[in-house]
Image: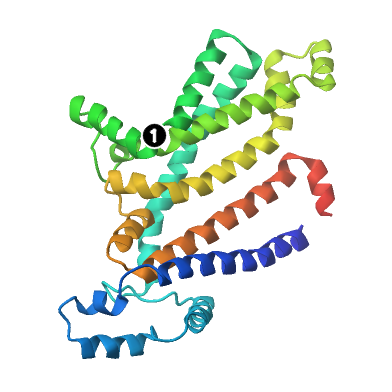
Amino acid sequence: MHKYILRRLLMLVPVMLGVTLIVFTMMHFTPGDPAKIMLGESAPEAEVIKLREELGLDDPFLVQFGRYVFNAVQGDIGRSYTTNRPVAIEIMERFPSTLKLAALGVLVSVSLGIPTGIISATRQYSLFDNIAMVAALLGVSMPNFWQGLMLILFFSVQLKWFPSSGFSTPSQMVLPALTLGTSSAAIITRMTRSSMLEVIRQDYIRTARAKGQAESIVINKHALNNALIPIITVIGLQFGYLLGGAVLTESIFSIPGVGRLMVESIKARNFPVVQGGVLFIAITFSFVNLLVDILYAFVDPRIKSQYK
């Protein structure tokens, strides 16, 4: 198990290098002069040239990329052009809100998706199954930004049940969590239904029923345990997706998270913050996938034997 975890951690190195190279390249060729952004458009040309030399912006692309990677390994991913604060500090100040939002979104999606998928599988082609699949299709199809605006118009403007912005009180967390979690709930519902349908047709399920075991035990103990592998995979992927997908949700509901910070930084051409934010989300997503792989061993003993 330890060797497997170490091997997966080592595999993160080329992934992080690839992500860093892609993001750095995109930011490097994006229109806009960081020196002018920092000094202002009306700054004298001599001061702009001097600042560009100090920041190393006149160096070749590979030299700038190598310097960025070298500093990033030491925990320095640059300074914000607008606040002159370390990017790592600004991200870590915002990350708890993004992590809380993503966790609430996963909680909503799992709470809705898994029970709905189980019931749909055990009552295939019933009225509930048909309604659930149509709702899942709608949930997958609706963009987060549109759904968030509709929830604000209905629950905040019309009914006045929940606030339309903020993320500090439980009432302020309801609409963002629903916005972020319903689309993932639709995906988890479809995966749970598909996985359960495959399992409940196996011989050992028919044997368990023939022995007279209660249907609830057959479904929850025998079928669900063996159907969890693809479900856990989807949940892990959706958690990583929610970390990145929180960008629009945070902007709509004015949540001070990493996503909103990145949107503001893109508008201000604040390249170090954008690079650092994408790199941080990529690292978090990779560790979530590693955690999902480790969870496989606790769900399926056969996988644990392969680790050994």
Q: Position of residue 37 (x, y in %)?
A: 25, 74
Measured as percent of width and height from the top left, residue 146 is found at 33, 35
SS assignment at label 1: helix
Q: Residue at x 39, y 86 (%)?
A: 58
Query: Can see residue 167?
Result: no
The residue under label 1 is 178
Q: Position of residue 125 (x, y in %)?
A: 61, 11
Above or below, comparing residue 191 to residue 97 in the picture = above
Query: What type is the residue that disc 1 sits on?
Result: Leu
Q: Nearer the viewer, residue 10 or 46?
A: 46
- Which quadrant of the view contains residue 39? bottom left
Question: Which residue: 53% across, 28% down?
Answer: 113
Is residue 239 in view?
yes
Name the image quarter holding the N terminus: bottom right
Q: Which residue occupies the foreground of this view, 197 or 17? A: 17
Q: Position of residue 35 (x, y in %)?
A: 28, 80
Query: Splitting the image into 4 quarters, where does residue 127 fall?
Result: top right
* Extreme residue in the top direction: 127
In the image, residue 6 sits, relative to residue 204, either above or below, namely below
Looking at the picture, does residue 255 appear above or below residue 171? Answer: below
Task: Decide: few, some or many residues near mark 1? Use Cα within 10 Å; few <14, some 14-19, many ≥20.
Answer: many
181 left or right, relative to 85: right
Say which of 153 and 170 sits in front.
153
* Numbered label tally: 1
Quarter of the figure that contains the C terminus: bottom right
Which residue occupies 24% across, 38% down?
164
